[in-house]
């Protein structure tokens, strides 16, 4: 079997923008997930900045979600390659993870090329609102947390079936609704967080 063709940055952006259809999008995500060189870069960066292999795995998975979200929302300005942008996202996600754990960490400049990427900490998401939302979603449990993140990126019920093992698309919709209801209940009980996010 021949090796799948490597997609260019233009192809990746086009397929992850939300206009190319589900199969092209899955092919683009598969290329990123299976990019061993990219995994090695992220692993090296995390290990050099106080993390573990498990931390690197979590950061990599989250960075894939954030990359797709940034491209879908037209926040990737092409001042760098997709790979460099991805590593920048991973960097800032790890810094925020450490902050949430109350372990302040300064990114080692020797392990990262300054000035080579966009200012992801400003453009990818608002830190305070993101922290608030993460804290809320963390209260729902791991399964709901993962499900809501894929749902927020407009994954189809059929895709959620494959990812989470639901017996039918209707079950995927039902579980997504249950998790959203739990999230709404959290904000109803914590109105100060609702104000931070302007959550409705």
Image (cartoon, rainbow, N blue to C red):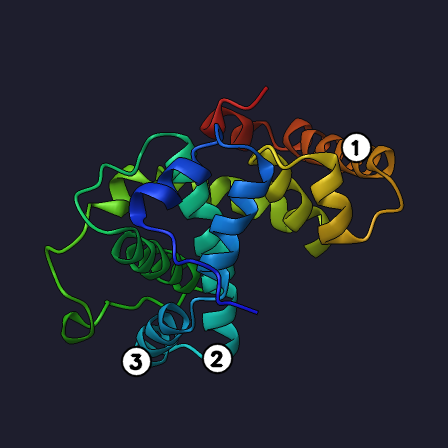
- In primary-sequence order, the first of circles 2 and 3 is 3
CA gap, disc 2 and disc 1: 33 Å
Is there CB contact under 8 Å for labels 2 and 3? Answer: no
Q: Which residue is mark 1?
A: 173
The answer to whether 31 appears left or right of 106 in the picture is: right
- Residue lying at 59% horizontally and 37% vertically, measured from the top left: 22
Task: Please provide percent x and percent y for residue 199.
Answer: 55, 24
> Does residue 129 appear anywhere in the picture?
no
Q: Nearer the viewer, mark 2 or mark 1?
A: 1
97 left or right of 144 in image: left
As helix, strand or loop, the secondary structure at mark 2 comes to helix
Q: Residue furthest left?
A: 115
Residue 27 visible to an observer of this rendering? yes
* Residue located 77% across and 31% down the image: 177
What is the secondary structure assignment of the residue under circle 3?
helix
| Residue at the spot 59% in from the left edge and 19% down from the top edge | 200
Percent of width and height locating residue 24: 52, 42
- Rounded to the nearest angstrom, the CA distance separating label 1 from label 3 is 41 Å
List the residue tagged with mark 2: 53
159 to the left or right of 51:
right
Q: Does 95 sit left or right of 25 as displayed?
A: left
Q: Residues within 10 Å of mark 1 (few under 14, many from 20)?
A: some
Q: Residue at x 29, y 38 (%)?
A: 76
Instruction: Find residue 94 and report its image quarter.
Output: bottom left
- Whichever of labels 1 and 3 marks the residue nearer the N terminus, that label is 3
Q: Residues within 10 Å of mark 2 (few under 14, many from 20)?
A: few
Given residues 2 and 125, the one toward you in this image is 2
For label 1, the SS is helix
Q: Which residue is mark 3?
A: 48
N-terminal of the pair, mark 2 or mark 1, is: 2
């Amino acid at each position: 079997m021949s090796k799948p063709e490597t997609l260019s940055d233009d192809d990746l952006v086009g397929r992850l923008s939300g206009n190319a259809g589900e199969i092209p999008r899955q092919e683009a995500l598969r290329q990123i997930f299976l990019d061993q060189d990219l995994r090695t870069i992220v692993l090296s960066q995390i290990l050099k900045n106080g993390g573990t292999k498990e931390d690197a795995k979590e950061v990599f998975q989250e960075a894939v979600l954030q990359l797709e979200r940034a491209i879908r929302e037209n926040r990737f300005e092409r001042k760098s390659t997709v790979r460099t942008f991805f590593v920048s996202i991973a960097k800032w996600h790890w810094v925020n993870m450490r902050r949430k754990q109350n372990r302040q960490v300064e990114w080692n400049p020797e392990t990262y090329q300054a000035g080579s990427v966009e200012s992801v900490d400003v453009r990818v998401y608002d830190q305070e609102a993101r922290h608030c939302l993460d804290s809320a979603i963390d209260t729902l449990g791991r399964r709901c947390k993962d499900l809501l993140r894929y749902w927020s990126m407009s994954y189809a019920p059929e895709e959620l079936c494959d990812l989470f093992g639901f017996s039918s698309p209707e079950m995927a919709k039902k579980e997504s609704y249950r998790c959203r209801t739990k999230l709404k209940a959290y904000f109803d009980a914590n109105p100060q967080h609702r104000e931070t996010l302007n959550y409705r």
